[in-house]
Each structure stands twice: as structure tokens, then as C-alpha cells.
Amino acid sequence: MNDYTTPYFGSLIMNVFTTLQQLVPQQQLSKVAGRLAASRHPYVKRAFIRSFAKAYDISLDDYERQSFNAYESFNDFFTRELKQEARPIDATADGIISPADGVISQLGQINDHKLLQAKGRHYDVGQLLADSEDGHYFADGSFATVYLAPSNYHRVHMPFSGTLTKTRYVPGTLFSVNNTTAANVPDLFARNERLVCLFDTPYGKAAVVMVGAMIVAGIETVATGKIARTPDIQEVTHDMILEKGDELGRFYLGSTAIVVLPKAAQANWQDDMQANSTVQMGQLLGMSNTK
């Protein structure tokens, strides 16, 4: 086997994986998964919860309910609540915290309206937010993308304090959002179904984008409840004050949360926060240096 064979087959496998995602009926698959995940039938929920916990080696040590039998459905288990002190919220003044448990996909500055998706791939912030004016506002800001693996805690929390002013549901595809797909699907996060949450903060407008994925059965926030899927964009105004660390929403299976900050935040990310860094909700990602 020569030096070129392994990269060739690796690329071929990734291309096949991406193509298969395009061929499967994504929305229908997610609907079926959603019905099963919501089932309270004792045999269905027990089989799903125990099989999933075994496959992903999930421990309940950090969670409020310590028995798999205590959950009413797979959805209830998947969105399980932490013990009160399980994730301390970093109290550094002007600190930006991780909104979720997971792995940093990418983080950095928004240059020429573009966010980094994966090595060699960028996408437009206006397309992500589904609004050209918002895209222009965040053109020279900063971002952090956190990928939530199946085994992670799947509630999303506030990375900063602010007032929720608007939510914007954007219908789209449901590609997987793991590293393989991110490296091979152009504009992945700006193509997938997502919920854009916009806030007024001490440094201006900021956003948290909750991105759906393959088999994600739904997205929910404390302001909207569970979002009903529609073929059109849904935009709702709000006036809800949320403090850093407060719960913002949750995923019913899967996905990714993207923090988008304006240029005025002057966000400086911690030196140890890089692509593939493991993070926990409440952990310090960086600083907003506005004074």
C-alpha cells in the first residue's frame, strides 16, 4: 500500500457518508425518531434508554435522577437535568461561558462576513442568521461553535447575560453535524434547520444559534416551547431577561450551538480553547473586553 492509498480511501468513505445523508428522507426519519423518542410505553422507553446508555457509556452521576427507570420517555432521559451544582458557572467579570457540554468545532473571528466551519470551509453569517441586516451587524464579530455528542448533557444555557428579543426558526436540511460532515458539506450550519435566538446585551446585539441535525426530533426554548416545524421561517418577538448560565433551551437528540458576538464585544478566546477542545457548560471560553 503506497502513501496515497489511505488518504484516497479515507476521502472516498467520507464522500459516501455525505452522499448517503443526502439520499435518506431526513425529515421523515426525524419524525419517526421523534415519535419513538416521545413514547411512554414501558417496553419502548426502557429499550431505547438502556440501549442508548449502554452504547454511549452514560453515567447518571451528574444528574438529578439517578435511575434509568425514573425517566418517562427517551426524550425525558435525553434532556435529563443536572444536579444543581454539577456545572459551576464561571463568575469572571465579562466572561463568555460555554453554552453546553461538548466539543468546540471551531471558534475565532468573523472575517469578511465568514465563519470557519472546518479547515478550508467557511460560511456566511447572514446566511446562518437568515437575515442580511443581522449578518452585516455581526460582520467583524466573533463566534464559538460547540458540538453536542449523543452522550452529552443536551440543554443549552446562556453564555452571557441579556434580554431575549427575538427567535427566528429557519427550516432546512438535517445533515449530521459531526466533524466528518462539517468537512464535506458546504455551508452545513447555514443549511440545516436551526433556531436563531437574538439578545440585547451590554455590548449590543448577540446571538445563540441552535442547529438541528440528522434524527433531531425537535428544538425547544424557555420562551417558545417546542418549535413546530414549518416550511417557512417563523419569527417571534420576546422580552425575556436571562442571566449567564440560565437555561435557554434544549435539543431532542443531536446537535450544535453557535455563539455569535458583535465586533463591540471584542471577544478574546482563551488560549486553551481551540478546535476539538472538550468543554462543559459554564466553563469560561473567553472574555468580552468592552469598557
Image (cartoon, grey):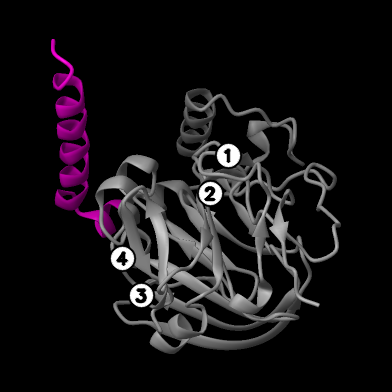
Q: CA distance from mark 4 to mark 2?
A: 25 Å
Quadrant containing the N terminus is top left
Instruction: Give the labeled residue for mark 4.
Output: 191
Numbered label tally:
4
Q: Secondary structure at mark 2?
A: helix
Residue range highlighted in magenta? 1-29
- Indicate whether residue 262 is drawn in magenta: no
Magenta region includes residue 16 = yes
Q: Label 1 to label 4, Cα distance in Å?
A: 25 Å
What type of secondary structure mainly makes up the magenta span? helix
Give the residue at mark 3: 127
Q: Position of residue 196 (x, y in %)?
A: 50, 74
**SS at circle 1:** loop
Q: CA distance from mark 1 to mark 3?
A: 26 Å
Q: Earlier in the sequence, mark 3 or mark 4?
A: 3
Residue under label 1, please give it.
277
Please state which of the two labelled residues, at mark 1 or mark 2, is closer to the viewer.
Answer: 1
